[in-house]
Image (cartoon, helix red, strand yellow):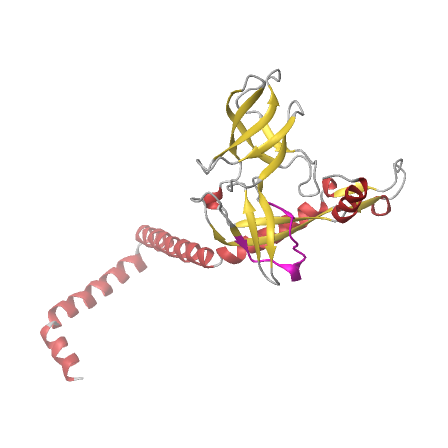
Amino acid sequence: MRNLIRFILINHFIILFIVFETIALLMVFQRNTYQQAIALSVSRNISGYVNSKIFSFRQYLDLHETNRALLKENERLRNSLLSSYKLKIPAAASVEFDSAWDQQYNFISARVIANSVNKQNNFISIDKGRVHGVEPDMGVISGEGVVGIVTGVSDNFSTVIPLLNIDLRISSRLKNTGYFGSLYWDGKDPKTAIFGDIPHHVTLNPGDSVVTSGFSAIFPEGIMVGTVTDFDFEGGNFYTITVNLSTDFRKLNYTYVIEDKFRKELIELENVSGYD
């Protein structure tokens, strides 16, 4: 209290000036319409600026939950796509959709919790596991394209071998011509991969899309892999094609694990038929 009184005594001229100035300004603004309009405009601008900053800060705090909500919504939309279903009855034009189609692909959303891009054998960890329906050998994609294949599963987590691993090969095809081959990473640039086994008579152009072939029970047909950036002859018979990957692994945060409901049936049939 003594310090407060001492402060007032030392600065009483400044305090009186501020009080009288405030009273004068209030009288001016109360009696003059023009000054009132200016004051209101300034107060609105200040209030709007402060509110916008507060709103932006709240959005930043809610960003994680917003992303999770969007991920779940995308999961629901992917599961409702016609491409996720398989026709049960050959000529079923007059049959109800629910009874004529079986859902073949189910998409399970997952968040990336660990990721590497600077090794020869990179791995990714995600926050979904066995209790969520994830199993080994399931395909994993992002919103942009192919990510990799599930290799290990615990109750609540899974490890994924991504395209950025020299031991992984993905059956892919050129979208515009249908020619298929094998896509793999050469361990160099995390933005590109190599696409081989395409014969030299096939017409290629920079920008051609490379998608999954659908020749496995891992990825549906037509999932984006990347685009052709460069190509050269390999031994005179096949191209060596450089593909710019559609998934940016350095910014990978969210993924979808693909469950193929017909996978077990297909594998059992292939085993009976003696396929390798």
Where residue 196 sits in the image (x, y, percent)?
Answer: 57, 27
Q: Nearer the viewer, residue 247 or 5?
A: 247
Where residue 215 sits in the image (x, y, percent)?
Answer: 70, 36
Question: What residue is rendered at 63% in x and 37% in y?
Answer: 223
Q: Is residue 27 above or below residue 181?
A: below
Where residue 77 sits in the image (x, y, percent)?
Answer: 67, 47
Q: Quadrant of residue 214?
A: top right
Q: Nearer the viewer, residue 208 or 25?
A: 208
Residue 129 placement, left or right of 46: right
Question: In the picture, which quadrant includes the C terminus?
Answer: top right
Question: What residue is rendered at 66% in x and 25% in y?
Answer: 179
Q: Quadrant of residue 216?
A: top right
Residue 113 placement, left or right of 74: left
Q: Give, as a single range, the part of the protein colored magenta.
A: 125-141
Where residue 265 sits in the image (x, y, percent)?
Answer: 79, 47
- Is 79 within the magenta? no
Residue 174 visible in the current orientation: no
Question: What residue is rendered at 65% in x and 48% in y?
Answer: 137
- Is 137 within the magenta? yes
Residue 244 placement, left or right of 72: left
Q: Nearer the viewer, residue 112 or 8?
A: 112
Q: Quadrant of residue 86?
A: top right
Residue 38 visible in the current orientation: yes
Residue 191 placement, left or right of 10: right
Question: In the picture, which quadrant includes the N terminus?
Answer: bottom left
Q: Residue furthest bottom?
A: 2
